[in-house]
Image (cartoon, grey):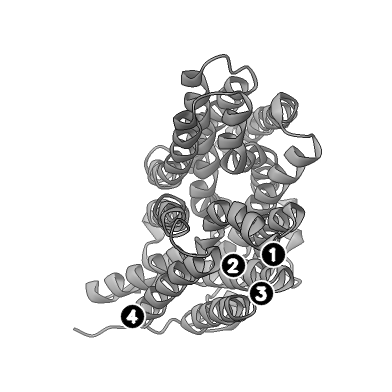
């Protein structure tokens, strides 16, 4: 069967081969597990402190600098996908992953893990690969961009569910760096094999938005409200993913509750990414966002006023689902806001998501953790209700001109 891409009258590429679609799905989803090593650091950090005497501040920086580096990369990812072949960009991202991991694994110290592991491999490498992968599936599945984009995002967070238990098990028998090397090399090897299936894709044909970083797009209400909404709603969930287990310990709950809270938050995060992407294609992304915001607020209140283990677990699940769900809505948000500038808009939205992921643990640490951190982050999350309301008002006014604006 002939495998190539043509363009229809709206400039949206149409794949003529089912085999090509399968190849692209494999080549874009499987590498996400390798970049999910950022979540594995949650399980590795305590061992790095205990066995190698690394500073707790450094181990926290390694976790925090990954989303910050990817946020910076996402800002100009729209320009990259419009200039270079998408397959080539994917290989660039994977190459940066390999280079960063090789240097960090051969010369494991605090400096190499900050610069090469966190920033280069899992930050910049991830940002470039995700931008190219998302642009590719947007060409293949323009009507199901929410579902496929949500699956792409879910594959990334699924690493927390799969790799963290493996890492934790290996550290019982191996030195922490050896355990990380085993998982990292295995996941990266699978990513390289999967990417070999990627067919050739030309650069996207988007309308120029001006500037390397497309800040002009923030003049569009849907783009601006989407960015603000994500920035203020994500920190609570990102803080919960990294601290909910420790919080359960501080409350002197049973050890099994601490473990269960971490697992529930991670599983809910993955489920939220795929579910929100799927629903955004069927009931409209704005309705999905409204549900997510209420879940986030409810989960934050539960974690702030946690009297029992059951409520803590419910709160962890709600907040984890909402945090992941916001990531899953990004592809559909970008398509609905500016379909002619999908790469640039999705880059801004993912940059906002990554920035929120950085701000959550940082603010929680500054506030000293505990109930105060949950309270402040919960208040910040509540402002997303105001942004969502303003967004819905704008869309309801726009519906007079275009009925499809409701979605």
Label 1 crowd (10 A; few <14 / some 14-19 / many >=20): many
Residue hosting label 2: 122
Q: Position of residue 89 (x, y in %)?
A: 54, 80
The answer to which of 208 and 375 lies nearer the viewer is: 375
Residues at marks 2 and 4, CA–CA distance in whole angstroms: 22 Å
Residues at marks 1 and 2, CA–CA distance in whole angstroms: 8 Å
Residues marked 2 and 4 touching at CB (< 8 Å) = no
Q: Earlier in the sequence, mark 1 or mark 4?
A: 1
Residue hosting label 4: 197
Q: Earlier in the sequence, mark 2 or mark 3?
A: 3
Residue in the image at 40% along x and 56% along y: 166
- Location of the N terminus (image quadrant): bottom left
Residue in the image at 50% along x and 54% along y: 331
Residues marked 4 and 3 touching at CB (< 8 Å) = no
Residues at marks 1 and 3, CA–CA distance in whole angstroms: 11 Å
Residues marked 1 and 4 touching at CB (< 8 Å) = no
Label 3 sits on a secondary structure element that is helix
The disc placed on residue 69 is 1
Q: Position of residue 33 (x, y in %)?
A: 43, 63
Residue hosting label 3: 116
Which of label 1 and label 4 is nearer to you?
A: 1
Label 4 sits on a secondary structure element that is loop
């Amino acid at each position: 069967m002939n495998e190539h891409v043509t363009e229809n009258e709206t400039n949206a590429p149409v794949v003529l081969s089912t085999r090509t679609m399968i190849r692209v799905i494999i080549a874009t989803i499987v590498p996400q597990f390798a970049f999910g090593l950022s979540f594995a650091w949650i399980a590795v950090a305590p061992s790095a402190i205990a066995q190698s005497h690394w500073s707790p501040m450094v181990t926290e920086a390694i976790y925090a600098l990954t989303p910050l580096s990817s946020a910076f990369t996402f800002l100009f990812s729209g320009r990259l996908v419009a200039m270079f072949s998408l397959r080539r960009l994917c290989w660039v991202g994977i190459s940066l992953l390999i280079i960063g991991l090789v240097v960090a694994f051969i010369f494991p110290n605090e400096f190499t893990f900050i610069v090469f592991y966190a920033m280069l491999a899992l930050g910049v490498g991830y940002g470039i690969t995700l931008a190219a992968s998302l642009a590719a599936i947007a060409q293949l599945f323009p009507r199901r961009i929410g579902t496929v984009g949500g699956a792409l995002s879910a594959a990334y967070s699924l690493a927390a569910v799969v790799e963290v238990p493996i890492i934790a098990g290996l550290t019982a028998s191996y030195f922490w760096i050896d355990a990380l090397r085993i998982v990292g090399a295995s996941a990266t090897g699978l990513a390289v094999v999967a990417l070999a299936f990627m067919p050739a894709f030309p650069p996207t044909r988007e309308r120029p938005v001006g500037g390397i970083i497309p800040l002009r797009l923030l003049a569009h209400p849907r783009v601006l409200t989407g960015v603000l909404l994500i920035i203020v709603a994500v920190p609570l969930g990102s803080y919960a993913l990294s601290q909910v287990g420790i919080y359960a310990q501080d409350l002197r709950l049973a050890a099994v509750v601490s473990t269960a809270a971490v697992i529930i938050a991670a599983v809910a995060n993955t489920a939220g990414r795929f579910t929100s992407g799927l629903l955004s294609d069927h009931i409209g992304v704005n309705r999905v966002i409204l549900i997510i915001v209420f879940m986030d607020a409810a989960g934050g209140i539960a974690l702030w006023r946690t009297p029992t283990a059951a409520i803590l677990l419910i709160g962890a699940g709600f907040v984890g689902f909402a945090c992941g769900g916001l990531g899953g809505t990004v592809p559909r948000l970008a398509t609905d806001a500016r379909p002619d500038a999908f790469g640039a808009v999705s880059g801004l939205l993912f940059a906002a998501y990554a920035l929120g992921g950085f701000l959550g643990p940082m603010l929680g640490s500054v506030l000293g953790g505990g109930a105060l951190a949950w309270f402040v982050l919960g208040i910040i999350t509540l402002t997303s209700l105001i942004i969502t309301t303003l967004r819905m008002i704008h869309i309801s006014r726009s519906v007079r001109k275009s009925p499809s604006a409701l979605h």
